[in-house]
Every structure is written in structure tokens, then in C-alpha cells.
Image (spheres, rainbow, N blue to C red):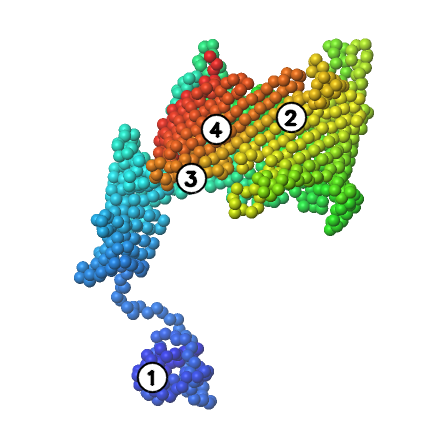
Amino acid sequence: MVIIYKNAYFDEKFIVSLTPQIASHIFTKIAFKPLHTNLFHIVLLSIFLTLGTSKVYSQEIPKKLEVAIPEIKQVTPDSLNLKVLPIPEQKADSIKTDTIIKKKPVLDGIVRRKAIDYERIDQKKKLVTLFNQAELYYLDVELKAGIIVMDYAKNEVYAGRIKDSTGTFSQRPVFKQGSNVIEPDSIRFNFKTKKVLIWNSRSKQGELNFIAEKAKKENDSVYFMENVKFTTAEDIDDPEYYFLARTAKFVPKKKVVVGPTNMYIADVPTPIGLPFAFFPMTETSQSGIILPTFNDTRQQGYSLQNGGYYFALSDNYDLTFLGDYYTNGSYALRFDSSYAIRYQFSGNVNIRFENQINSERGFPDYSKSTIYNIQWNHSQDTKSNPNSRFSASVNLGSSTYFQNSLNQVNVGSRLNNTLSSSISYSKTFNTVPSVNLSLTANHSQNTQTQAINMTLPTLQLSVDRVFPFASEDQPKKGLIKNINLQYNLRGENQIRTTDSLFFKPEMFRDAKVGFQHSIPLNTNFKVFKHFSVSAGMNYNEVWYLKTLRRNFDQDIGSVVDREVEKFDAFRTYSFSSSIGTTIYGTFDFGETKKIQAIRHVMRPSVSYSYTPSFEKYYDTYALDASGRMQNEYTRFEGGIFGAPGLNNSNNIGFSLSNTFEAKVTSKDSTDMKPKKVMLLNNFNFSTSYNIAADSLAWSPVRVTGGTLLFKDKMNVNFGATLDPMAIDNTGRRIEKYNIDNGGSLFRMTSANMTVNYSITSTGKDKPESKKDQGARNGGREDDLFGTNVDFGERREGVFDDENKNEGSTEFFKTDIPWDLTFAYSLTYGNNNRENEIIGNSIMISGNLDISPKWKIGVSTGYDFVQNGVTFTQLRFERDLLSWRMDFNWVPLGEASSWGFFIGIKSGMLSDIKWDKRTQPNRVIR
């Protein structure tokens, strides 16, 4: 019986599986071509019938095979008496074709190797030896050494050093797996178990360097070490200090756990030790405890300072909490947080609070006070949003904070009399015309008078200039086409208070609110080709929410002012114009002279302004009980934007600006072009004459000037006030010229001069200090008043590291880095015939690198009026490689103090330090 399944197909596999006789008969009778498969079935059946085959079996249903056979006509399954059946479900064969289990390869990857001298293979011992600069690579393992021996019978690799021609061991093995690098003396590695034995291994994790006498790599993430040294020193073979741990467990990029450990300095053991220790080794910030520093003070007793906790909140912001405690009950708290989002903004917030108790309760000098300081700095990336910007620079708090703080010494802030803050937001609307909007909160605080002025907030709105008589693509030339107008709005909420009332309800009680609208109309043009003329008119409208009413109070018998909380406004206008030109003059002395020529540029200008009288806004009030009236008061007095004027203002102003420049022959004989040297950057005169004034029409003449000397290193500025009018015996100006009163043409009422000079050993400009905390506190950016010392952060030195010369090993260097800053100030006063020098002082600051590791500095000065030495600070610093030592001393004044510090530079081991200091003597004895 022959069975042919419906839709069954046969391929070469089926044909080959038949008997050789059948297969050969098929291939001799059939040629392969595309043809309908039912014909192929019939042909196969006829072949089997011819050969006498009774059954046909197929173990698999093959893919379709296209076969070409001779054409057979009128052949059907019925004509051959065939039965067509559906294809039955196939069952998996229970007989396995291959019962042999394949062995897993010994190595999971290809081993690549090379060496310079030779590669030797010992088939008997099954060893492969690579000699001199040998390298072996397997998966993520890289091994380089002087000699590498691979035992492929044990699946192990040995690596070590070789001796050079002098007998010195060289080419220490370097074992690298992933990002972990180990440099031992010798190493043994098993490819199969992935375990490693290491002798005298060296590795670096973060800021820590490790060298272990013996180490065992248990798996991909755990090392066990014996007699391990860890240090932050760069020279791991001869470190200036290290910690010796008997046992240690090392998990790369995660942690190091050590057993009994003690500290060695210059290979000498110290009593500093721990029974165990844990070091986090993650590459990201982690939260942790900050150990305090022990100290003692004269007034507060013993203390623990700058202890707290660091919170690693995220990659974008963190928080540091620090606190101090003193045995007499004083305490201090500080919160410091930094934040940043790349390409958007960054900033930090610093809040400090101190509760100070001086002496002991019951003693006559006992006192208790609280001081605080808040600092916030925020800056926005200019690319984050070009149309809006937010920034903040805040420094506010108690007026006596920097004078009395127990946790920092900042003489620059102590001598500064002003604390200022500003928070601003601005946005530009890209309309036609464009509109600019800004909101600003300002703060100004006088630390001497404790007066505080704030604007919460200031609103400013301005509409860009509009040229009504010129199109956008047309040039703005001439009187008419240059006519333009703007609109400006300014609103303020002004608060004036004192330190004691800051942030209290009384602070807002006397707030003043006002709005000022202004519409300036301007134009400019030229006359006679060389004269520039500008003219303008300005319209102002001021709104106030509070005004005053002045009258005579019968109950108290005097004139009183009362606030009227009611909207009121006044309107003013004014006119102004000016004309000016530029005149060039040259004095030529000849090309053979040292000074070939002097160029003089003059810019004279005459201005005129007129403001009419607005007496309609003035009222009368009774001076006394008799009813006598006085016409000198306006209800807008004391307003933010002033009050309308009672009298006409009709002023003519005169100004003359001068610059002097010389053309000098160059010292270089090969340079044919002369050099330009600025003699005077500016030399200006200005005065005014009031046409409408009945007397004292001339205002004093103001003279200012400045220049740069010594290759622009010295900046000299001077100024003087010359009054043509005389004064009487009381010092009041009178309607009489000084020359007619027996004096000179002008009377010098005041004069001042300042000189600033900064020079370095390299001749370049002194780099800006990277320590901006002193400037943020309100001090100077330079070190004329000493350097800021923040006891909460002692990892930074008292000097900038611009002149650091780490690579220098010379015993003596001829180029010793140094810098010098010099400031001189002179002030003269003769306003009331006193004719005296009011101020005359000099300040000097210098820093010197006496060796690559030693730095000294001094800031001092002298007051020639008071005949005394001003603030003086001496600074010393020694770079001890992994350590830093500094000593600063203020020997004079109420800020006299000294401080000594020595500690490890690394932030990971910054708690290992000794910090001894005295607080400034703030008590006058």
C-alpha cells in the first residue's frame, strides 16, 4: 500500500534517505524544474510501483522542492486508485541524535598576548612565558608586566618584575579590570575561579592610595588585604604619613572596612589609632557626620565647634548643618546649602545664628545677645532663557555680626560699614516696540548707625523708543526723523527701619509707596557739521498713596505733620538741551625726539535746562496760635520721588573734558613705529549758572582727573572743588566773589587723591582671588585688610595657589614669586576755613614665596592723621605635601588674635587636624 499525504512536499533529504537504487533511479529519470507538485507525487508513486516497493515512509515534512519532470497528461489520483489523507500531527522524536555532552570551554574568551624579547611555549609543562614588556588581554582583564607566565594546565597566570642592566627591578605589573587598577610587585591570577593573589599591591580609589603587603581578590567585587597602608600622599612608596591596618576588606567604588589601625608619620608610629574604621568609596556624595573641633575662649570657656552633619540630598543640591556649643551656655547654628542645575542656574544659601553669653551670670560684665547673618547667591545661565533672568545677592543680618562672630575672623567685613542685598527678575517682551519689565528688591544697611533702607519691591517698566516720523528701515537723520519718545514706569515700596525693628510689624508701619511715570521726548542733530545738538522735553507724573497735612496743634502748641492715607498725584515737566563738539590739537616735536608729539583732545559742552515753578501744589499753614500763615509747604514732602519745585530752575551748565596722549620713540631700535602713551585719561571741569537765582547763581567748579602709570599698574585719581563765592564768619556762602573779598579767584573747599598700585614678580596683573567669601561678607576682594578666616572651613589656605610650584625640586630659585598691593588716600577739607588734612593713610599688602613650599604675607598700614598703625596681619603657610600648616597673627587693635592650624588637605580625612586659636579681644580693658 502506498500513502501520499495531501499537500505533502518532498526534497532532496527525503530522496537521499531512500535506498541507493531508488535515489539513483529518481535522479536519472528526473530533471529539476518548476512544476506542479501533484504531478511530482504521481511520478514518485509510479517509480515505487515500478521497483516493487510496497510502502513509503517519511519522518519529516520537508520544504517545498521545485522539480521539473517530463510532461504527463491525464493522470489523476483516482486513475491510480490512490487514497488521499490529511497530514497527521507530528510528535517529537524520543530518540536523541547525540548523547555525548559537550564540554564547556576552559576560557570564555580569546587570550591575546605579546612581548618584546620572546614568547616561549613549553608543551611538556604546559607553560607560556612572555618576557620584557609583556602584555596579556583576556575579557575585561589587562595585565602588563616585565614577565608573564601562563600555566594553561592550571588556568593560572603569574606576573612579576624583571631586573634591568643595573640589577634594579623594573616593569612592575599593572593589573586592570574594568576601572580598577592595581600595581603590585607580583600577581597570581586564575582564569577559572577569577581569584587573584597579589603581593605589595598598589591601588588608588578616589583620594586614597593603598599599598598592601598581601591581598586576595575573592571575586569581582571583594578584596581581602593584610598589613595595608592607606594615605592621601602622592608618593605611595615613601609617603610622609600613612595609616597601617592589620586587616582590611576592600570593595572597589563602595567601601573600605579596616581592623585595628594606627597612624604613622615619617614611618614613626603615633598614639593616634582606631579599633576599626569605615571609609565610603563611592564616586557620588554621601551623607555623614562632621566631627567637631575642641577649643577654648576667654569669655565663653571651652567649646566644641563646627560639628554637625552633611546631607547629600541629590546630585543637584546638598545641605550642611553645623553647630557650636560653649560651656557657659553659648551656642551657634549654621546651615549651608548649594544647588545647581547644569545650563540653568546655580547658587548657595548660608544662614548663621549665634546665641552669645559673655562671662558668667552674676558678674558685672555678664551680657547676652543674639546675632545672625543670611547670605544667598543665585545666578542664572545666560543660555537657559534669553528673555528672562533671575539673580540674587543677599547679605543681611545683625549689624554687629562680623564684629562679634565667634566662628570667623574677617577684618575686611569688620571695617566695612555697609551690608547690601539685591534680588532681581527681568523679562523682555519681544513686541514692537519691545517692553522690558523688572522687579527688584534692594537692601542697604549701615552697620555703624544700624539704619536699614529697603525697597520691597521696585517695579520698572519701559517701552522701547519709538520714532514717529521715521520708518524702521529708514536712517534716523535730521531734526524731525530723530524725534523719539519712550514710556517709563517706576514703582517703589520703600521701608526705613533700624536693626532692632528688622522683620517686626513696626518695620512695615512707615512704609512709603509711590509710582513715577515719565515720557521723555528727545531728538539730536548736527549744526555747522561739527556741533552735535540734543534737545528734549520730559513729562513726569508721580502717584503717592500717602501724603501729609501740616497744621498748628492747639493741644501741644506746635506745628505737627500728620499722614493722610489717600491717593494723590502731581505732574511736572521740564526742558533741556545741549550742544557740544570735539577739538583735536597736536604738538609736534619732531620724529628724532624722545617725545615726538603730544595729542590733546577737548570736548566742550554747554547745556541748558528749565523747570518752571509748580506753586499750585503748595499750601499754607498756621505757624502759631495767632494764625500767622506760612506758604512753604507741600503735601508731597518726604515722598519717594521728591516733591514739585516751588521756584523756577533756569540753569546753564558748562563742562570741558580733556585727554592727553603722547607719541614716544620705542626703546626697541628695530621697532620703527612710535608707541602711544596715555598721559591723562581724563581731566574734566564742570560748573553751572542759575539764571533765575537772585543770588549765589554760580555753583562751585568741580575738577576731576585720572591717569595710569607704570604700564597701567598704578591708577591715580584726583579731584577738587573750587568755589568762586566767598563765605562769612559762620561759613555761609555770601553774594560776593572770593576775589572781591580779598582772596583768590577760587576758594578750594575740598580735594582728594587716591593712588592704587599692584605689581607682581612676573610683571603680569595680579590674578583675582578665588576666595570670594570675604567679599560676600562685605569686605574687600584683595587682601589689603587681611584675608578672611572661616573656622568652619579650614581646608583652604590663607593664600591663593596661583604661584604654586609643585614640580620644583631646586634648592634655590632665583625667580621668587611675590606680589605687592599699595593704596594711598589723601583728603583735604577747607569748607569753613579749617584748612586741614582730614585723611591721610597708606595701606600695603604683600605676599612672598620664600621657597616652593613656604609662603609669608603681611597686611599693614599707617594713618598719618591719627599717627598710628592701622590694621596689621601677619600670615605664614607651609605646604607639607599631603598636609597644610598655617599661622596668622593680628598683633594690634581690638581684633588682636592668633591662630595655628595643621591638618590633612584631603576632604576625606579633613577631621585629622589640630586647630588652636584665640578669639579677638573685643572687651576694652
Front-most of residues 867 and 459: 867
Q: Position of residue 534 (x, y in %)?
A: 75, 38
Q: Position of residue 808 (x, y in %)?
A: 36, 40
Identity of the residue furthest to the left in this view: 124
Q: Which residue is mark 1?
A: 23
Q: Is residue 94 left or right of residue 712?
A: left
Of callouts 3 and 1, which one flags the residue occurring earlier in the amino acid sequence?
1
Secondary structure under badge 4?
strand
User: Is 64 above or below relative to 644?
Assistant: below
Of callouts 4 and 1, which one flags the residue occurring earlier in the amino acid sequence?
1
Residue located at (66% from left, 25% from top):
721
The type of residue carrying mark 3 is Ser
Q: Which residue is mark 2?
A: 720
| Residue 139 placement: quadrant | bottom left
Q: Which residue is mark 4?
A: 845
Which numbered disc, 3 or 4, marks the residue closer to the eye?
Answer: 4
| Residue 856 placement: quadrant | top left
* Whole-number angstrom distance, CA of label 1 to CA of label 2: 124 Å
